[in-house]
Image (cartoon, rainbow, N blue to C red):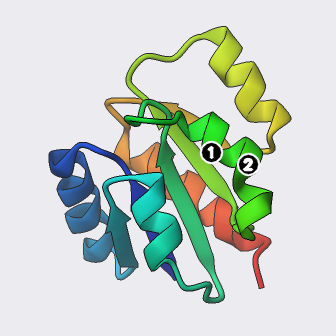
Amino acid sequence: MTVIVVDDDEAVRDSLKVLLESYGMHVEDYPSTDAFVRGHRPLPHQCLILDQHLPGTTGLDFLSSAQAVNINLPVILVTGRGDSVIRSRAEDLGVVAYLEKPIDDTVLLAAITQAVKGTP
């Protein structure tokens, strides 16, 4: 299983990488959606942990345009500043889970399991 983390905060990416690798997951991490699009190679059993508040674009804005760049992954949206509008838009865009930082490890692991359950 591969988990892709897109977050502009290096400390967040590093801590998620350490946590998820301790559970035997392979982790790719990117500081921006642009870096993700340039570096991502689709593989079976992947999911995307995407920060909402990224410089240049929001996670949700990226998701609404993701089909144009052939990104078709289950998504877990994370945010440090969430609200009901973001949550509603995330649901409309089909995110698997909407999590607010700081993220509880158990909740995150359950969301990842749910996300990859339906992928080939």
Furthest residue in direction top, as rendered? 84
Residue 96 can be seen in this image = no
Residue 77 position by quadrant: top right
SS at badge 2: helix
Residue pictured at 63% horizontal, 82% vertical: 45
Return the residue at label 2: 65
* Kind of residue at badge 2: Ser
Q: Are marks 1 and 2 in contact (CB under 8 Å)?
A: yes
SS at badge 1: helix
Residue 88 point in image, percent of width and height: 76, 21
Residue pictured at 69% horizontal, 67% vertical: 71
C-alpha distance separating marks 1 and 2: 5 Å
Q: Few, some or many C-alpha atoms within 10 Å of disc 1 (few <14, some 14-19, many ≥20)? A: some
Closest to the observer: 56 or 28? 56
Residue 16 position by quadrant: bottom left
Closest to the observer: 24 or 39? 39
Residue 51 point in image, percent of width and height: 45, 41
Query: Relative to 44, does residue 103 appear above or below in the rendering?
Result: above
Using residue 63 as the reference point, say whether residue 98 is left or right of it. Answer: left
Return the residue at label 1: 62
Residue 37 point in image, percent of width and height: 53, 68
Tell how many labels: 2
Which quadrant of the figure contains the C terminus?
Answer: bottom right
Residue 70 position by quadrant: bottom right
Q: Few, some or many C-alpha atoms within 10 Å of disc 2 (few <14, some 14-19, many ≥20)? A: few
Residue 65 point in image, percent of width and height: 73, 48
Query: Relative to 104, does residue 19 appear above or below in the rendering?
Result: below
Using residue 8 as the reference point, say whether residue 15 is left or right of it. Answer: left
Furthest residue in direction right, as rendered? 92
